[in-house]
Amino acid sequence: MKLTHSFPSPAPAEEVWEALLDPERVAPCLPGATLTSVDGKTFSGEVKVKLGPVQLLYRGSGEFVEVDPVLRRAVMKAAGKDTRGNGTASALVTFQVGDEVVVETDLAITGRPAQLGRGLISEVSGKLVGQFAECLASTLRSVDPDEVAQQQHLRVVPDEPIDLIDTAGVPVLKRVLPIAAAALAVVLFVVVRRRRQR
């Protein structure tokens, strides 16, 4: 599944570029993510995902496989597995920084989140990218050393899970309500029919 998103650079391109190459700096801006270790171009962490009453915890690792400072373009490969064996997720993420930050993701998922379908996953990921962009802008505006230290400290604090249903909001309701209405109609039909047969 290929997804493309973009957002205006919240600071000079070079500053944004350097921030995006620093997992410790941007990890607090990734909803549901907790960074656990960094070693050069590789890193590891976990992501919590909530899907209705079900909560999943993905643990995995990633690395920068390409970094082009001239074009300000980088390719990152990441993969994780749900700790309960309910699915896997892997992504090849390419981002390029200019007046805009363009993010292209080649995503592969299995398990419960895959049941959401491409349309809903695209909607959710778009909103998550928007949240990330807002947080990144706030982080880059920060000039207070104590505030920066506090933001970086957040990377070792378990984050709240990404609530996919809550994040999607109205689009989910548009999909769920017709199904719920149809199910209710079937139930009412069965109840009325049973009463008539008595």
Image (tube, rainbow, N blue to C red):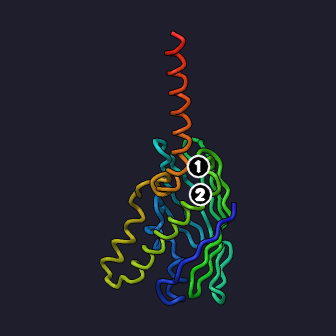
Q: Dot 2: what SS?
A: helix
Circle 1 sits on which residue? 113
Image location (x, y in percent) of residue 137: 43, 79
- Residue drawn at x 58%, y 76% is 6
Q: CA distance from mark 2 to mark 1?
A: 8 Å
Return the disc, 2 or 1, that comes first in the chain's sequence.
Answer: 1
Give 164 or 94, whichever is nearer the viewer.
164
Q: Residues within 10 Å of mark 2 (few under 14, many from 20)?
A: some
- Residue drawn at x 62%, y 45% is 111
Asked if the residues shown at circle 2 and circle 1 are in contact, with their CB atoms under 8 angstroms apart, the answer is yes
Image location (x, y in percent) of residue 71: 66, 87
Image location (x, y in percent) of residue 49: 50, 52
Q: Dot 1: what SS?
A: helix
Q: Is residue 65 left or right of residue 175?
A: right
Give 179 or 36, whichever is nearer the viewer.
179
Circle 2 sits on which residue? 121
- Residue type pointed to by label 2: Ile
Give 192 or 13, whichever is nearer the viewer.
192
- Residue type pointed to by label 1: Pro
Most extreme residue toward the front, as rendered?
196
- Residue drawn at x 57%, y 80% is 101
Image location (x, y in percent) of residue 174: 53, 51
State the quadrant of the N terminus: bottom right
Q: Decide: is 3 above or below 98.
A: above
Q: Decide: is 56 above or below 125.
A: above
